[in-house]
Image (cartoon, helix red, strand yellow):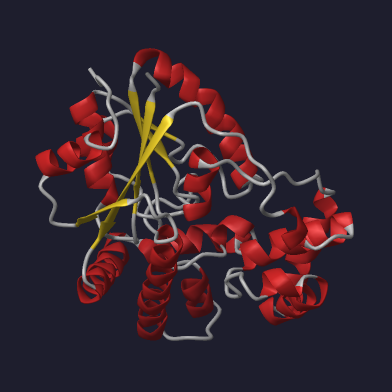
Amino acid sequence: MKNTLIAVVGPTAIGKTTLAIALANHYDTEIISADSRQFFKEMRIGTAVPTPAELASAPHHFIQHKSVLDTYSVGDFEKEAMLLLPKLFEQKKVVIVVGGSGLYVNALTKGLDSFPEINPEIRLSLNKELEENGLTSLQNQLKELDHTYYQKVDLENPHRIIRALEVCIGTGRPYSSFIGQKRDNRPFNIITVGLNAERKIVYDRINQRVDIMMQEGLLEEVQTVYKHRTMNALQTVGYKELFNYIDGNWDLDFAVSEIKKNTRRFAKRQLTWFRKNQDTLWVNHTYNLPEVITAIESKTVFDAK
């Protein structure tokens, strides 16, 4: 009988944390966070880190354990999480992974493509170019060096573009040529549960969450990291828009409206990513927990207790 990893996925603001905690409590187990921005301790409000009460209700891993000044990649996450999982499985039959960062969830459930080590100076140079010349310059470079990946990547995500470019430059090969290589099968069962709702409900929840973040002090949080605004971790929704406000480019109301708009776009991209997995068990955000548990257990046979 294999151990089981239950992945809870879905668009931002849909309620993944609540479901993950409920499942962790039911199975008396622990939670691995696969939210690539909740790793950073300076970004509590803008990444909707679980509340102290939520963190206390079930053991969590990979929450605010890094600084925005640290270099931390999806490869680093995969290595650390795959070292932790066997230790958790020694005590638990089930472990929960939760997050809206599809690449990080896949790092655990499917493994990553293998990339060679890249000289870190290349990334520093690309970050400097981003700061001085803007994202369009990097987009044009990627189009020239790897047109295949250029057509697939989210062109508004500087982290993804910089990662692709550093591989192109560091290896002399297109980033896309490293994708799709054979990966190792995971030595545990994987069940993916996707939370969703009608688009209007998702968008309303996003708008409400942004308003709450502003009330809780998101602007003040962004001001504390402003001096580090070129770091990869901060090239994300909620921070970029308020940097523009601080720079005097936008007024505050417009910046907040842009956060909402860009978060809605992000949620749409999340759903596109997660829908690629044909095996996902999709449930409505108004789920009945016993029914979800029954559906999960119908997919495999295990004694979680």
Looking at the rendering, in which quadrant would you find the N terminus?
A: top left
Q: Is residue 42 left or right of residue 256?
A: right
Residue 2 visible in the shown view = yes
Residue 253 lies, with reference to residue 278, above or below; the image says below
Residue 189 lies, with reference to residue 104, above or below; the image says above
Looking at the rendering, in which quadrant would you find the C terminus?
A: top left
Residue 124 visible in the shown view = no
Residue depicted at x 63% and y 62%: 159
Find residue 46 and report its horizontal and vertical position in percent. Answer: 40, 59
Residue 269 lies, with reference to residue 86, above or below; the image says below
Find residue 206 and report its horizontal and vertical position in percent. Answer: 28, 69
Would you identify the image quadrant in which residue 165 lies?
bottom right
Find residue 155 and report its horizontal and vertical position in percent. Answer: 61, 75
Looking at the image, the residue that sits furthest to the top is 90
Residue depicted at x 58% and y 69%: 157
Q: Nearer the viewer, residue 264 or 215?
A: 264
Q: Is residue 9 left or right of residue 199?
A: right
Would you identify the image quadrant in which residue 188 lies?
top left
Q: Nearer the viewer, residue 166 or 180?
A: 180
Find residue 57 and report its horizontal and vertical position in percent. Answer: 22, 31
Residue depicted at x 22% and y 36%: 298
Residue depicted at x 44% and y 60%: 276
Looking at the image, the residue that sits furthest to the right is 172
Q: Is residue 237 left or right of residue 294?
A: right
Disc tally is: 0
